């Protein structure tokens, strides 16, 4: 069993009691009482805190009492003597677990005092923890063995910072190859997924905060995010994994819509945000890490900025199947992992974008023939849209910051090209932004200077977060017709869901989820 623990970190007893009540109401399965945050720390104060935790709510919730060393992430620099006195008092008050630092436990005097306190407790257990706030451990497997050698009954807790998502696989491997009770997590944005899959891999505890302001570690999710967005309560050891590979990924609504649809159909599946930073080498290493570990049960991926061409290249190098359309476009936004750990690559942007354009403009696909179109950007989304418009016979001009990249794309589809400096003179009936400019959180940016748009134009922004970008606001002021990115996003996601599950998704549920998340 994996406990969902909520840290209680407050400067005084009353505020801590309020947090305890809120955490239990939100569904906490365990409380971590971070007594190192208490300003007037004393053994009696901690006894009182443990008693309050025991009597709070309408159900019994086990407690971990932690008084962290400042060097290991503690809030206030209390003396080791006081910290051990606090842990001893917590055990006497009925705390089920105390957390002490492995490095400090190696001190013989500290070890003897902790052992004595545990021997006088009928049910208290020891968590021996170690943290690395900068990087990975040199050898996490050896460190795990050392902790158990020093104190076999202890629950090892090993937490380190993942500077890249590929750093997480050491934590996954340790959980996979070891048994018993152990806590293994990664901190930081790149380590966020480890907090979600901890339950699948049977970590003894994973942590979530009451809200973003009360987080006690980098990358810690809130309990609401974990339970509602990532379907924590339904995660099991055989849950199949999917995810969106992107950089950045925090803005993505893909986890919300896919998890909502998985939930509606009671599927044992989970969709994750996968922050893969870097270029082709880092992308390749991530997919190799996934494919080598069949026990992780990754079954499919959405692929977006900036990895769509990398996904195509990797699939071809790995001997996977690339659909002809994706090959023609030169970009992949959907990957399926086969039973043999091979890959199948598709592009759902093409149809999703063309459908969004025609419905948004109120025209048939035939009306795209000879329509003058300005495409801003030359990345993966642009490639799919240019391919679709080219097939429809539109007259396309591609604008990009790197002119050479625009030139290469234009050469593939027999289009015109230019640098962004020529945008003020654009002459087109349809303007499409295929860049990430204006995407949350950078909502005050636009790819077009004022004065470029008029009432006879239609403007399509493939950015969907926010729904109304600054570019679309400019277009409205000019009297132009506007097409937001939500329709394309939902269209391509529907096609991806079909690839992922061989079933049709609930279109209205997807749209409703997108709108609700954007309003939040």
Image: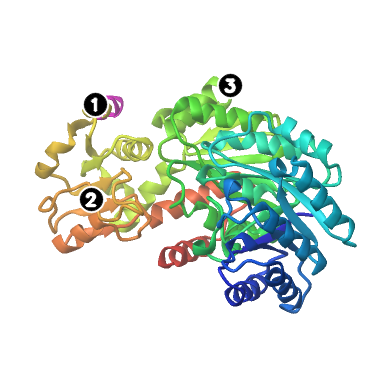
**Residue 43: which quarter of the image?**
bottom right
Q: Nearer the viewer, residue 220 or 489?
A: 220
Q: Residue at x 39, y 57 (%)?
A: 486
Q: Which residues are drawn in magenta?
A: 406-413
Q: Residue at x 46, y 50 (%)?
A: 250
Q: Earlier in the sequence, mark 3 or mark 2?
A: 3
Q: Which residue is mark 3?
A: 319
Callouts 1 and 3 close, C-beta under 8 Å: no
Q: Which residue is mark 2?
A: 446
Q: Is 336 part of what is drawn in magenta? A: no
Q: Secondary structure at mark 1?
A: helix
Q: Secondary structure at mark 2?
A: loop
Q: CA distance from mark 3 to mark 2?
A: 40 Å
Residue 78, numbered circle: none
Q: Residue at x 49, y 31 (%)?
A: 311
Q: Secondary structure at mark 3?
A: loop
Measuring from the top left, give residue 264's x and y in whole percent: 63, 63
Quarter of the image for the N terminus: give it: bottom right
Callouts 3 and 2 close, C-beta under 8 Å: no
Quarter of the image for the C terminus: give it: bottom left
Q: Earlier in the sequence, mark 1 or mark 3?
A: 3
Residue 407, numbered circle: 1
Total marks in image: 3
Of tags 3 and 2, the one toward the viewer is 2
Q: Nearer the viewer, residue 122 or 202?
A: 122
Measuring from the top left, give residue 107's x and y in whole percent: 74, 41
Secondary structure mostly seen in the magenta stretch: helix
């Amino acid at each position: 069993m994996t406990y969902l623990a909520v840290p209680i970190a407050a400067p005084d007893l009353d505020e801590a009691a309020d947090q305890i009540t809120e955490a239990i109401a939100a569904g906490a399965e365990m409380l971590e009482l971070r007594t190192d945050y208490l300003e007037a720390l004393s053994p009696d104060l901690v006894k009182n805190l443990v008693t309050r935790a025991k009597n709070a709510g309408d159900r019994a919730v086990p407690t971990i009492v932690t008084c962290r060393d400042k060097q290991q992430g503690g809030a206030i620099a209390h003396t080791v003597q006081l910290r051990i006195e606090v842990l001893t008092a917590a055990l006497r008050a009925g705390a089920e677990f105390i957390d002490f630092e492995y490095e400090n436990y190696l001190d013989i005097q500290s070890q003897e005092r902790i052992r004595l306190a545990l021997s006088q407790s009928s049910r208290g257990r020891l968590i021996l923890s170690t943290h690395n706030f900068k990087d990975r451990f040199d050898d996490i497997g050896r460190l795990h063995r050392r902790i158990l050698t020093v104190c076999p009954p202890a629950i090892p807790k090993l937490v380190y910072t993942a500077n890249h998502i590929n750093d997480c696989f050491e934590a996954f491997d340790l959980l996979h190859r070891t048994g018993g009770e152990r806590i293994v997590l990664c901190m930081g944005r790149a380590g966020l997924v480890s907090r979600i899959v901890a339950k699948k891999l049977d970590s003894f505890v994973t942590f979530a905060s009451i809200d973003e302001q009360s987080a006690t570690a980098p990358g810690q999710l809130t309990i609401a995010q974990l339970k509602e967005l990532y379907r924590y309560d339904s995660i099991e050891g055989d849950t199949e994994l999917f995810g969106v590979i992107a950089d950045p990924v925090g803005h993505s609504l893909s986890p919300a819509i896919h998890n909502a649809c998985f939930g509606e159909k009671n599927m044992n599946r989970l969709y994750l945000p996968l922050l893969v930073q870097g270029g082709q080498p880092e992308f390749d290493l991530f997919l190799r890490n996934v494919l080598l570990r069949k026990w992780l049960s990754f079954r499919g991926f959405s692929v977006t900025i900036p990895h769509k061409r990398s996904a195509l290249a990797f699939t071809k190098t790995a001997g996977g199947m690339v659909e002809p359309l994706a090959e023609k476009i030169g970009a992949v936004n959907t990957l399926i992992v086969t039973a043999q750990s091979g890959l199948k690559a598709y592009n759902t942007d093409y149809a999703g974008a063309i459908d969004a354009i025609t419905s948004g403009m109120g025209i048939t696909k035939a009306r795209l023939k000879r329509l003058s179109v300005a495409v801003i950007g030359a990345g993966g989304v642009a490639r799919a849209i240019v391919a679709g418009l080219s097939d429809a016979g539109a007259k396309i001009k591609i604008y990009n910051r790197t002119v050479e990249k625009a030139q290469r794309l234009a050469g593939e589809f027999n289009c015109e090209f230019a640098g962004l400096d020529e945008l003020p003179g654009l002459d087109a009936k349809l303007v499409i932004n295929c860049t990430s400019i204006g995407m949350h959180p950078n909502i005050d940016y636009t790819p077009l200077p004022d004065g470029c748009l008029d009432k006879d134009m239609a403007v399509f922004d493939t950015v969907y977060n926010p729904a109304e970008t600054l570019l679309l606001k400019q277009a409205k002021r000019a009297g132009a017709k506007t097409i937001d990115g939500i329709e394309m996003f939902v269209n391509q996601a529907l096609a991806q869901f079909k690839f992922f599950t061989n079933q049709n998704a609930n279109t209205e549920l997807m749209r409703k989820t997108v709108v609700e998340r954007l309003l939040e």
